[in-house]
Structures are given as structure tokens and as C-alpha cells.
Amino acid sequence: MRSPIKSVRRRVPCVGRTATALVATLKARISEGQILSGQFLPTERELSAEHGLARMTVRRALRALERDGLVAIEPRHGCRVLSAANDPRRGCPVAHVFSTGPDEAVLDEMHQHIHAALRSVVAARGWSLLEVHMSGRPGAEVLEQLRTARAWGMILDAADPKLLALIRASGMPAVMVDAWDEDSPLDAVLQSSYQGGFLAAQHLLERGHRDIAWFGPVAESSFSRERFGGAAAALAAAGLDLPLSRRVDTAGRDIEAAAIELLSGVDRPRAVLALWSSPAVAIATAASKLGLVPGRDLDLVGWAIGEQYDAYAAKFAGRPVPPTVVWSSADMARMAVARLADRQANPQLPPMRINVAAKLRIEGE
């Protein structure tokens, strides 16, 4: 005779009333700023003693906070408060961290364009933007300022390895804008330097040039390395290269004097890549002083922010503005804020590098 089937009642894990009360208490302490983003909650033992609860009850409460995305349980360390606990809908800001001081930043037109674009994009989401300047301050001090201000994330223009390591360890979402190096551990939104260098050299090749000079830094930063690499790749595709004799590394040099020297020789180049604003203006000024006619005696390609193009063009003082690689700081801001929101929602995303497209702007076209 077959045995009757017994009804088996499965035990479904749930958060009991005491655990629910602890969850509410901890949420309140986090939302009021008593426990800041990046800090650890008291240990299970401490919470058990403070609230008179069993360790298992405390553990259930912490797991509930983890499911809500407020903490991350880190084995052998504890529960770290995540930036999602600092809700931008409650007025918690995103910080724009400048590597410079406030006076230096005012003089830096490019980063002021980026800051203005970020402020507009952040405001459109109903968030607030906190402006923070490092100016030689220790990274730990800057992070403490952000925690005190209850910032839930940061956008920064610094690439200092020690600072980036501190930020990564803090757990605060962060995106680098217009700053990066090959070992950066964070998300970054950048000008497409390689693409711009390629387009610039390709333009000169299409103009029939085979003897092209480089005028600007070469190995000074990731930007210079990539612009040089893009230009070299375009020349390599045409069976050419950038010989040492045609590379003028302007790092640490008087660029006006270097430009005159480059264009004064009998074997001067007929085409120059000057993929920064100041070197491009220096080459154009030197060519004018030497009586060289743009388009006939010399072809030049420069570089500028798209939103700053009119101010850049004015620097040529009525002379023809050369073809110029441009990119958009507004696009950079939109991409950076979108990635920061993704990072807040999904802290485990791998670091990503996002390039803002570059294009060649030619006057009259």
C-alpha cells in the first residue's frame, strides 16, 4: 500500500519585524548623513549588542539593505555604504572635481566650457553640481569633503594614480573627463585624439603632401601620444612615416621661436600638423612673418573645441583659419553624466573608455 503524500511546508526566508525595524533605523542614519557613502556600517556584533538582536537577525537586515542597493557586503571587511544611498532626488550633488585651484580654472577656457556643459546637463536631470578644486590638496581630504557634502558621484579632470586608487577604493561612482592615462582604473570620456590625428594627416595627404611635419608635444600625455599615433597611422596607410627630422616636440620650448625655426630653412616642410590651439596659431603667425601664403606655400591643420571655435579663429587675426579638428564639450558632458548614472545603478560595471567623435572643420565648407 502506497504511503499517503505528506504536505511539506517550506520555510521561506523573510525579514522579521525586529529585522525590519533595524533596516528602518539604518536607512534613517544613512539618509541623514550619519553614515556616509564609502564608510562601513557597525559590525554585526556591534549592531547585535546595540539593538539587542540575535546575530542572525542583524544579518537578515544587512542583506535586506544590500538587496535595496544601499550597501555592499564585503567579506572580511563588513558592509560599505554605497553612493546609491545618497539619492540625487533628495538634493545630494554630483561633484565636478578640478585638478587646479579656482583661479587657475578660470584661466582654463577649455575646462570652463566642460564645466558649463556639465552644469547644464546635470540641471536637466534635476540634479545639483558641486564644484570642488584640488589645487595640491591630498586626495583623502578631497574625498572627505565630498562625503561631508553627501556627493553621490564625481566627475574629475585629474589622472593622478594615487588619487584614482583612493577613488576606486572609496566605492564612489566616478568618471574622468578629458583626463586619462594607460593605467587609469576608472571610466573616462575623452576627445577622440587618435581619430583626430588620423583625419588631420589624411587631409594633408589628400592635398597631395608627402613631406609632412609634426609640431607639438609627442610623448607628454596620452592625448599627444594618441594624436601622434593617429597621424602616424594615416601616413603608414599611405606608405609614409613621420621621420625624426620632421618632428618638432614643443614640450618645454618657446613655441613661437620653434615655429620660426621650422619654417625658415630652405628645406622647410610644406605641410604641418599642429594639433593644439597654441601651436597652430604659432605656426600661422610664423608663416605670416616669413611671407608664406597659406594654401600655396604652406598647409596647416589645427585643433580646437567646437564651442570655442570662434574664439580660436579670432586668434589668427584676420588671416585664413586653417582646417581644424574639432570636438564637442557638450557631447562630452552628456556622455560623462550618462555613464555616471550607469555606474551608480550598476557599481560592478567594468571601466569603460568613451571617445567623443572628432571631425575636420574647413572654413567655407
Image (cartoon, rainbow, N blue to C red):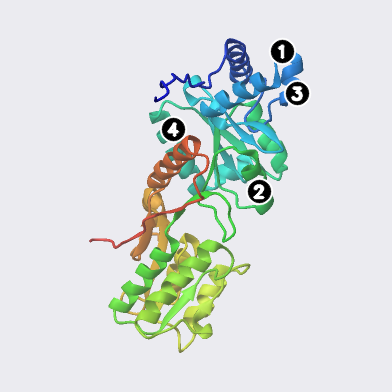
**Which residue position holds label 4?**
122
Q: Nearer the viewer, residue 210 or 198?
A: 198
Kind of residue at disc 4 = Val
**Number of marks in picture:** 4
- Label 2, residues with CA under 10 Å away: few <14, some 14-19, many ≥20: some
Eye-nearest disc, 2 or 1:
1
Mark before the other along the chain sequence, 3 or 2: 3
In depth, the one of 164 and 235 nearer the eye is 164
Residue at the disc numbered 3: 45
Classed neighbour count for the residue bearing mark 3: other residues with Cα under 10 Å, few (<14), some (14–19), many (≥20): few
Query: Which of the marked residues, 4 or 3, is nearer the chain's N terminus?
Result: 3
Q: For residue 51, which numbered disc appears in the image?
A: 1
For the residues labelled 1 and 3, the Cα–Cα distance comes to: 10 Å
- Tell me: residue 267, above or below residue 172: below
> Quarter of the image containing the C terminus?
bottom left
Rounded to the nearest angstrom, the CA distance separating label 4 from label 2 is 26 Å
Q: Which residue is mark 2?
A: 165
Structural distance between the alpha carbons of marks 4 and 3: 41 Å
Q: Nearer the viewer, residue 68 or 141?
A: 68
Instruction: Farthest residue to the bottom: give it.
Output: 266
Label for residue 173? none
Question: Secondary structure under badge 3?
Answer: helix
User: Distance from label 3 to label 2 (Cα)?
Assistant: 30 Å
Quarter of image, res 271: bottom left
**Is 127 left or right of 363, judged from the image as shown?**
right
Disc 1 or 3, which lies upstream in sequence?
3
Circle 4 packing at 10 Å, graded few (<14), some (14-19), many (20+), is some
> Under tag 4, what secondary structure?
helix
